Amino acid sequence: MELLGTLRTINRGVAVLVGVMLLGCAAFVLLDIVFRQLGSSFGGTDEISGYVMAIATSWGMAYTMLELGHVRIDLLRSRAAPLGRCLFDVFSMVVLSGTVVLIAYKCWPVLERSLNNNSTANTPLETPLALVQGPWFAGWLWFAVMSCITTLVALNMIRKGQLSETEAAIGAFGEAESLQ
């Protein structure tokens, strides 16, 4: 559980950096809107904001997972005994980890191709795609590592019989539970 606390702290720092990046992007778009009213424009704000959203999403997923913010349908889980709830939770973490590892694995060839070909966006900005895809890939890789570590920690807690701690670490809580 101590490891998950450390990971939460790191991911909160990452979330703050991503938030600053999003605020900077919003300010950039707002400034471009003001300039358009004055007859000028930076150009490319839609492209840049799309890149920022892709990067923010990939990095934000690990934070959301550790803060138990991912959506889960818990109809069966909510009716199970503590061990059953933990098994449902671990099953969902195993599936999540497998999915995210596959996504990260499939993201690498995209970045590799851009690096090998010195690819640029087919837009007036001609953005070098590796500049965008590198942080995007790193975010997915980070999420994959975080989900695998979290799954292993949860499995270890179940092995030790720490069911309530497991549920607190990776559980899904219904709307009524989260409001109490």
Image: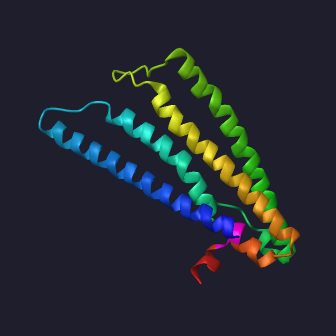
Residue plotted at (57% across, 58% down) = 63
Residue 33 within the segment the image draws in magenta: no
- Where residue 8 sits, quadrant-wise, is bottom right
Quadrant of the image occupied by residue 32: top left
Report if residue 76 is visible in the image: no
Say whether residue 123 is left or right of residue 12.
left
The relative height of residue 48 versus residue 93 in the rendered view (above or below) is above
User: Which image quarter holds the N terminus?
Assistant: bottom right
On the rendered image, what quadrant is the C terminus found in?
Answer: bottom right
Q: How is the structure coloured here? A: rainbow
| Magenta region | 169-174
Residue 43: image x %, image y %? 27, 30
- Residue furthest out toward the bottom: 180
Residue 18 lies, in percent from the top left, at 45, 51
Q: Nearer the viewer, residue 91 or 112?
A: 112
Q: Is residue 112 found left or right of 32 in the rendered image?
A: right
Residue 179 lies in quadrant: bottom right
> Magenta part mainly helix, strand or loop?
loop
Against 9, residue 29 (above or below) is: above
Answer whether residue 36 is visible to the viewer in this image: yes
Locate residue 105 relative to residue 135 in the image: left or right. right
